[in-house]
Image (tube, rainbow, N blue to C red):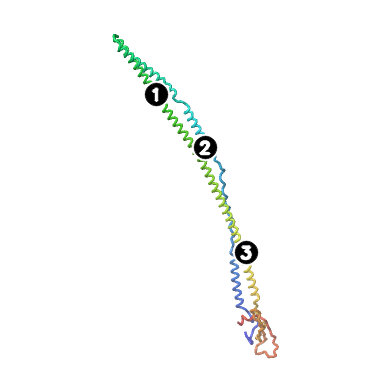
Amino acid sequence: MKEGDPVNVGQVLADRDRERARLSSQREQVQLSLSKIEQTKLLPPPDPLPVPEVQELPPNSYKEEEAQISGAELALQHAQRNYDLALSTSAFITQQVNLEMEKTKADAAQREVDLQQRKLDAIAKLKGLPPEVTSHETVVLDRKISERDQQQAKYNHAAAELQNAKEQRNAQLKSLTNEVEKARANVQLAQSHLQSAKAKRSYDEYQHSLTKARRTEEIHQFQQNQARQEQEYLQQQRDREFQIAQLNTKLGEIDQQLGELSTVSSPYAGFVKTIRTLGQNNQNLQFQITLAIGGAGNVKPNSSAEPFSTGHDMKKLFG
């Protein structure tokens, strides 16, 4: 627009289309960002799951092992008592007495044989004795020898019985000794079971203390993570609210700027008489437009045409 240009009623004299378009585009971008933020839902951290507690160890008890020791000690006492009783008892007194009796009889029978033999030898030296005497004494000798042999057999049998009794006695004592040793070994085994149970209990208690310490540390770490997640969630909420507030403020500023962009229209039909620069305010240039009513050729220098003026930012209009 320049001086002398005709104007019609309602014709736009000054408008900032490019600035309005720029602000409108900027407002759309800000509104889009605001919508995205408002539609984005922040998920709070999940509720913490209950942390299972470490179960306590069962009550400390060694009743089973102690009962085994008591039973083994009782069996040892019983075995030792049987051994001592067998050791203090003469199991072959009868055989010993019988052997001595049979030996006495065998010795006596042998003396009878020896005596009869000497008698027969003495008769043989005598002369003039009838032969019947020698025959009779010989028969007596044979009978005594037979009796001696029988008695010797009884003695041998008694000796065999005594030997057998001794062997049985030794076997019995050996068996009882084995029973004592076995019972003593069972006592030692039961005691070792008790010691093993105590050692295992100590190890279990140590492992249990480690487990409780680890669980305490896990709970502490879990609580720290939970607190951190809650703080992050709260911070995200604050950041979201801050961004929304910033964008709303930005929208308000843009709307205010759009509201300040006024459109100047001509109230009359006429022509542009003068365009005068009034000054500059920041980035805005102020102009005064004077309109003359009527056509350009019908206005005289002394025309009483009423001027119309306005101040407006013309910098962007006229570049």
Circles 2 and 1: CB atoms closer than 8 Å: no
Could you tell whether 242 is left or right of 98 in the image?
A: right
The amino acid type of the residue labelled 1 equals Ala
Q: Which residue shows up at 54% across the image and 45% down it?
A: 202
- Element type where label 1 sits in the image: helix
Circles 1 and 3: CB atoms closer than 8 Å: no
Give the labeled residue for mark 1.
159
Viewer-side label of 3, 2:
2
Q: Which residue shows up at 62% across the image and 81% down it?
A: 315
Mark 1 or mark 3, which has the lower sequence index? Answer: 1
**Alpha carbons under labels 3 and 2: distance apart:** 72 Å
Give the labeled residue for mark 3.
238
The amino acid type of the residue labelled 2 equals Ile
User: Which quadrant: the N terminus?
Assistant: bottom right
**Alpha carbons under labels 2 and 1: distance apart:** 46 Å
- Percent from the top left, x then y, of residue 260? 65, 76
Give the labeled residue for mark 2.
69
